[in-house]
Amino acid sequence: MIKELAARVQRIKPSPTLAVSARAEELISAGKNIISLSVGEPDFDTPDFIKEAAIKAIRDGMTKYTAVDGTAGLKKAIMNKFERDNKFKYEPTQILVSCGAKHSLYNLFAAILNQGDEVIIPAPYWVSYPDMAKLMDAVPVIVKADIEQNFKITPAQLDAAITSKTRLVILNSPSNPTGVAYTPDELKALGKVLAKYPNLIIASDDIYEHTLWDKNSFCNILMICPELYDRCVVVNGVSKAYAMTGWRIGYAAGPTKVIGAMKKIQSQSTSNPTSIAQAAAQAALNGDQSCITTMTNAYKDRHDYIVTALRNMPGVRVQPCDGTFYSFPSVEGVIEKATNINNDIDFAEYLLTEAGIAIVPGSAFGSPGYLRISYATSMEKIKDAMQRMHRAIENLLN
């Protein structure tokens, strides 16, 4: 019998978003009428031209191992994407293709973090950042930004969080879970702080780059502060923009030394991403980009409906989003007034059991008192869910 597991396993928790989704599926299987607003996954199908590229790859016999860091064709498509969309120039040795953007980030954490190193993570944060740091024996340093400052950290907060042990700073814009994006001026101000600390590495998580209402508004810190080129790793993927979550293709670009270390780690874990998925990703990046606009327009319509609905609910505050398919309302007003609800976790449980809505509590993202609502589902379900939520809050407060 196995008596002990590795200490690293004890330091982390399972993904709370996946846990909520699994609970919702269990209730649905049991015959309950549950609307899930928990999963960050486009409800659209992968566009046909991308599927056809994968089918052709299978028929052409592209079913063998590829280079660990990705096929030459996909890496070229990624380099072209960076030059086209971001005005970045990278060499093939500066690109690593992995099994999703999460895998790219994991490789980065594993490549640069030692025991006791500190990782600055703005909160609200994507749920996996702190646990990835802990897996590497590093220390997550959480910098909180609430709804009052539109969920964005200030230069003063960033400067105050940096110590001699700080190794990595993570920026995710547009953000999961808040849907907000930093402006060029805000990124420039953060960049001035980072310029003072030449030993820091910056990770720019751009997975929601194309899911923005204003197509001309995307910028990341490297676009605004090109002087950070030699110590910035840009992470992206095809999952969100092209509705390809299950294909598991992400990629990273950055300094050759860092990318080389990430490649070495990947060579001893997964090796290359799936050959067929790489062919599909290459087609996605090189092909007609109008599918992104179609999906984003639908998310914008859903966003507008949800924000209006939430603003009419007692005890709820919400900020409009810049993009993604998430809303992150504060329900602190509900929690304060409800006699049998002590926190956002209790409230999410109440909504699941009493209203049949699966929503992830804000505590999972480092922000107690909030909820993350995913609107990557049909407008019909969203309208039903918002009506249920409104009624459930009124029943709770009356």
Image (cartoon, helix red, strand yellow):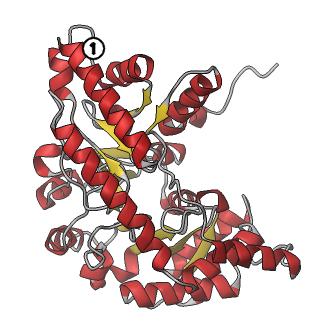
Q: Is residue 3 left or right of residue 378?
A: right
**159 up-or-down from 311: above or below:** below
Q: Looking at the image, is 299 positioned above or below residue 348?
A: below
Rendered image quadrant of residue 46: bottom right
In this view, 205 is above or below 303: below
In this view of the protein, can residue 276 be seen by the observer?
Answer: yes
Q: Which quarter of the picture shows residue 23?
A: top right
384 left or right of 315 in image: right
| Image spot of residue 15 (x, y percent) | 52, 38
- Seen from the viewer's position, the closer of residues 99 and 306 is 306
Judge left or right: residue 371 versus residue 334: right
Seen at 28% across and 45% down, the residue is 306
Quadrant in which the C terminus is drawn = top left
Name the kind of residue labelled 1 in the image: Ile
Front residue (pair 382, 216): 382
Q: Which residue is found at the position 43% from the left and 23% from the top?
A: 352
Q: Quadrant of residue 316?
A: top left
**Residue 290 % position (x, y):** 46, 79
Residue 180 at what x, y percent from top left?
A: 25, 57
Horizontal side of 4 relative to 122 (left or right) equals right
Residue with the most extreme top position: 339
- Residue at the disc numbered 1: 341
Give the quadrant of the N terminus: top right
Q: Residue at x 32, y 78 (%)?
A: 222
Q: Secondary structure at mark 1?
A: loop
Count of marks, rendered view: 1
Does the rendering let one see residue 254? no
- Residue 305 locus on image (x, y percent): 27, 48
Residue at the front extreme of this rendering? 380
Residue closest to the eye, 44 or 4: 44
